[in-house]
Image: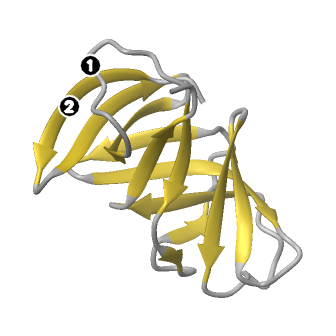
Amino acid sequence: MKIKINQTHEDHNKVIVKFYSTNGNGIAFWNGTAPNIGDTPDVEMDIDEVLCWHKNIIPSPPKTPLITFSKNTTQIIARLIHDLDNDHAVLKLGQAIILIDIEEQHPQQSDFVQVTTTKLHLYPTNT
């Protein structure tokens, strides 16, 4: 996924970036050499926590991929694609794919979901 770095800062030896993508704006931990403001890297996203239904993942009435943030929390609206096992699934955010861990599968097949996280990580892919 292509993003544009809007802001960077360091907190407890971790680089945190605010970024823009075609799906909206987010905030995430950066893994690797700190980027510069204005850089447009291609990144992979990872949510570094197990998602639990009705806690940090819920069905979403909006059916449009979107990233937003408030303070240090990122919300992602994306299409949920169930995997073959009960602990893993995929979020499709536009053209990007995010692998996720889910505590348990939702009993009904969800289409779009809203994920709320403070543990979004970005990994540059073209370094």
* Residue 111 percent coordinates (x, y): 77, 58
Q: Quadrant of residue 109?
A: bottom right
**SS label for mark 2:** strand
Q: How many marks?
A: 2
Foreground residue, 33 or 24?
33
Residue linked to disc 1: 36
CB under 8 Å between discs 1 and 2: yes
Residue at the top extreme of this rendering:
38
- The local secondary structure at tag 1 comes to loop
Q: In what quadrant of the picture does the N terminus appear? A: top right
Residue at image coords 64%, 49%: 78
Q: Amino acid at mark 2?
A: Thr
| Amino acid type assigned to the residue bearing label 1 in the image | Asn
105 on left or right of 28: right
Name the residue located 57 percent from the left edge and 69 percent from the top edge: 58
Residue labelled with disc 2: 8
Residue at 64% x, 54% y: name it: 61
Residue 33, placed above or below residue 49: above
Task: Please state the horizontal and vertical placement of residue 47, each as a whole percent of the image.
Answer: 49, 60
The one nearer the camera, 56 or 124, is 124
CA distance for labels 1 and 2: 7 Å
